[in-house]
Image (tube, grey):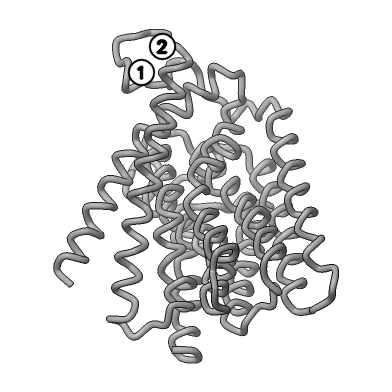
Amino acid sequence: MIVTVALLLVSAVVIYLACEFFVNGVEWVGHRFGVSRTAVGTVLAAFGTALPESVVTLVAVVFGKTDAQKDIGVGAALGGPLALSTLAYAVVGGIFLLDRARARGNIAQEFSTTRLARDQAWFLVVFVFKVGLGLVAFAWKPWLGWLFLAAYGLYVWRELRSEGHAADEVGEEWREALKLRPHAEHPATAWAVLQTGAALVVIFFASQLFVHQLETVGPWLGLSPQLVALLLSPIATELPEILNAVIWVRQGKTSLALGNISGAMMIQATVPSALGLFFTAWLLSPALLWGAAITMVAIVAMLGLLHRNALTARRLLAMAGLYAVFALGVALRWH
């Protein structure tokens, strides 16, 4: 167990350091390809950091030989949005509270609440639809997986076409020098792509190591593989998004931090869901429905705060309480 804990800590540190290189590189990639600042977070960064959990779902539902293995993939597809809508937002609130100059202010002053509210509403519609499909069985259900892929394609198209909100855009002086070329004022695009890609590779393998250690910890805690996939694995696979948010909030780039979270949520609501529909019966267990209900409560609460322009650090931090409610429900009912 000492070795497992040590590997957990080491992999977490490696993921954080790799995320430092990733967020720096992806900003330059977005700049070189003319992508708006907000779209850098919602599309480029979100797509990159969502790869680990998408791979978890792909491997489980395509190559899983038993129903239990396929259930792990379905659990990962539902657990990702749960972790992002509660823990990831709570971490952003916690980072704000650590900064005395920003702790008491209204977070909404640092980004476009209209844009984030629109993204969250879009996610909620897709998420409710996919949960509804998990309650019924019919022959042509797998074909609906293409609708989820189309929904994500439409989301990406809309984000890339958007020029961004003025409050979300930061000037050239906010972009740090590319870490691989610290003395180059205008590094070549190839260097930015290389740094971003290499960081993603490190994040992927370090995340896999982190997940495997959690799978070892699960039985020690008395958790079944399905509960590990629902409770612990999403925390590990969403760690890159969470750490990206930490880095960007510390740098004063709140729109990128929140955009990365909301963009990753859109991927989780569509791509893994499509895979689940293609390769499984997509019938959700009571535990998964409980997690889905908590996710929807979190998004409705976020939408309420955004529409009332009442988003503060403490209220964001309180989102972690919803994950605690979820974990408590699982422990009391299904442990």
CA neighbours of label 2 inside 10 A, class few (<14), some (14 to 19), many (20+): some
Q: CA distance from mark 2 to mark 1?
A: 8 Å
The N terminus, quarter of image: bottom left
Q: Residue at x 76, y 49 (%)?
A: 151
Q: Provide residue 310's location: percent of width, then percent of height.
A: 58, 53
Q: Can the viewer see residue 103?
A: no
Q: Can the viewer see residue 54?
A: yes
Residue 187 is marked as: 2
Which residue in the protein does label 1 denote?
177
Pointer 2 with pointer 1, Cβ within 8 A:
yes
Q: Is residue 40 above or below residue 258?
A: above
**Relative to 134, 324 lies left or right:** left
Q: Is residue 299 above or below residue 20?
A: below
**Relative to 147, 186 lies left or right:** left
The C terminus, quarter of image: bottom left
Q: Provide residue 113's location: percent of width, then percent of height.
A: 64, 43
Q: Residue at x 57, y 58 (%)?
A: 58
CA neighbours of label 1 inside 10 A, class few (<14), some (14 to 19), many (20+): some
Residue 298 is marked as: none
